[in-house]
């Protein structure tokens, strides 16, 4: 069985990796699908997010990373996938996730959503928190895989340089 794990991954965190590692053991293949999501004005470009995720997930052979910019159910059909994997951290995630799962099923009747809970140490971790801490000069090395940490440091240097101009 093939599954898709969609998200913005701006950037990929250890919480995402935890869900991906669990999912990769349940499904024959797992497609990590990175949404371009211009509406959210991501910090990292789609190319950067894909590259960081590929480098961080290279140790899992049945995981593939691809970008997408169309409707997710269309992308799923193009790839012959009908299972969506999502991570659930707290009750606060549930309402949005339920709405998303039911909307997807309304548009694609065979679409099933599977929720996995991460290890408790990642329950409070989010990409937005990582971006916020990093932008204020905090150390995020324990929250993200090392290829992501490297890019965050580079991005901070670029920003400092831009501010000096
Ligand atoms: P989106 O833009 O769809 O919210 P994200 O990249 O933020 O995309 O998240 C993708 C998926 O990963 C969502 O199902 C989200 O709930 C889940 N997720 C995010 N952070 C964590 C975490 N720390 N532990 C488990 N799941 C997570």
Image (spheres, grey):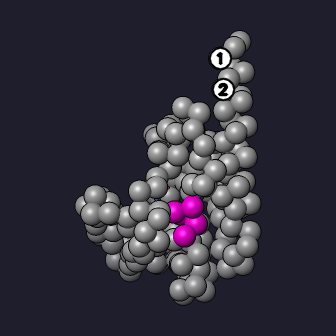
| Residue at 70% over, 39% down | 153
Helix, strand or loop at mark 1: helix
**Viewer-proximal residue, 55 or 113?**
55
> Dot 1, crowdedness within 10 Å: few (<14), some or many (≥20)?
few
Q: Name the one closer to the observer, 123 or 48.
A: 123
> Regarding mark 2 in the picture, which secondary structure is present there?
helix
Q: Are marks 2 and 1 in contact (CB under 8 Å)?
A: yes
130 or 141, which is in the foreground?
141
Residue 56: quarter of image: bottom right
Tell which residue pokes out farthest to the top in this image: 165
Quarter of the picture containing the N terminus is bottom right
Q: Which mark is residue 159?
A: 2
Residue under the image location 41 percent in, 73 percent down: 117
Query: Number of callouts in the render?
Result: 2
Quadrant (top left/top right/bottom left/bottom right) for the C terminus: top right
Q: Give the class, few, some or many, for how many residues have Cα within 10 Å of label 2's Cα (few <14, many ≥20).
A: few
Q: Which residue is tagged 1?
A: 163
CA–CA distance between discs 2 and 1?
Answer: 6 Å
Q: Position of residue 162 (x, y in %)?
A: 68, 20
Which residue is depicted at the point 60% across and 43% down?
Answer: 139
Whether residue 17 is in magenta: the answer is yes
Q: Position of residue 29 (x, y in %)?
A: 61, 81
59 displayed left or right of 10: right
Residue 148, horizontal then vertical, whole percent? 67, 51
CB at mark 1 closer than 8 A to ligand 1? no
- Position of residue 102 relative to residue 38, above or below, is below
Image: magenta residue range? 14-18
Q: Is residue 88 left or right of residue 24?
A: left
């Amino acid at each position: 069985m093939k599954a898709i794990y969609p998200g913005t991954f701006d950037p990929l965190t250890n919480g995402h990796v935890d869900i991906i590692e669990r999912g990769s053991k349940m499904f024959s293949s797992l497609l990590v699908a990175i949404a371009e999501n211009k509406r959210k004005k991501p910090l990292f470009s789609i190319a950067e997010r894909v590259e960081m995720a590929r480098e961080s997930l290279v140790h899992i052979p049945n995981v593939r990373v691809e970008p997408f910019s169309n409707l997710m159910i269309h992308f799923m059909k193009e790839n012959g996938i009908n299972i969506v994997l999502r991570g659930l951290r707290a009750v606060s995630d549930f309402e949005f996730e339920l709405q998303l799962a039911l909307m997807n099923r309304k548009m694609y009747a065979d679409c099933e959503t599977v929720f996995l809970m991460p290890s408790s140490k990642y329950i409070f971790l989010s990409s937005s928190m990582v971006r916020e801490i990093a932008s204020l000069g905090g150390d995020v090395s324990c929250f993200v895989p090392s290829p992501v940490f490297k890019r965050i440091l580079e991005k901070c240097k670029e920003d400092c340089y831009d501010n000096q101009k």
